[in-house]
Image: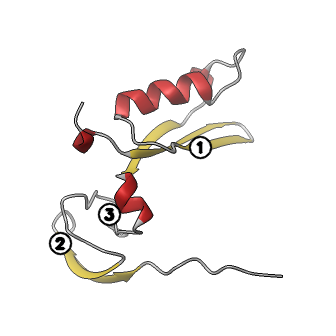
Amino acid sequence: MSHKDTMLHRMFAQNGGITISAQTKEELTFGEAKKMAESELFPENVDPSGFQPFVVLPLATKERWENRSINFCPRCGSSLKDYELDSSASFTCYECDTSMSIAIAEPVSHSE
């Protein structure tokens, strides 16, 4: 498995009024992330197939995530992993043919 095939992932599962969400701390392949979600996200006596939707979404490489790089088109959701984007950029998404300017701001910390 090459480093290029691994990413951080976010998982979501819903059943009635219950929503479970988690995010990997380390980069995994999609298959590894799905297996991890099925085995660790649910208690031992809960069948993951009873949760619909149950999705595993690739986010970005750990480096791009920590650098707050732009990873997905906000209009169509397509991955921008092949674009060389920082936390602020003007670009055209080739999937939806939309030109846009995006800036990811630093989180605001509220000190008491």
Q: Are marks 2 and 1 in contact (CB under 8 Å)?
A: no
Q: Is residue 105 left or right of residue 31?
A: right
In the drawing, what numbered circle is on residue 22?
A: 1
Model colouring: secondary structure
Q: Nearer the viewer, mark 2 or mark 1?
A: 1
Mark 1 crowd level (few <14, some 14–19, many ≥20, 10 Å Cα): few
Residue sitting at x 44%, y 33%: 33
Question: Marks 3 and 1, how far apart in space?
Answer: 23 Å
Task: Identify residue type, mark 2.
Answer: Asp
In the drawing, what numbered circle is on residue 7?
A: none
- In this view, the residue in front, 49 or 88, is 88
Q: Which of marks 3 and 1 is in front?
A: 1
Residue sitting at x 22%, y 36%: 2
Mark 3 crowd level (few <14, some 14–19, many ≥20, 10 Å Cα): few
In the drawing, what numbered circle is on residue 76?
A: 3
Reading the image, the residue beneath label 2 is 97
Task: Identify residue type, mark 3.
Answer: Cys
Residue 102 locus on image (x, y percent): 35, 81
Residue sitting at x 32%, y 63%: 76
Question: Marks 2 and 1, how far apart in space?
Answer: 32 Å
- In this view, the residue in front, 102 or 6, is 6
Q: Which of marks 2 and 1 is nearer the N terminus?
A: 1
Helix, strand or loop at label 1? It is strand
Residue 86 locus on image (x, y percent): 30, 74
Task: Identify residue type, mark 1.
Answer: Ala
Q: Is residue 24 left or right of residue 84?
A: right
Residue 57 locus on image (x, y percent): 42, 45
- In this view, the residue in front, 66 or 38, is 66
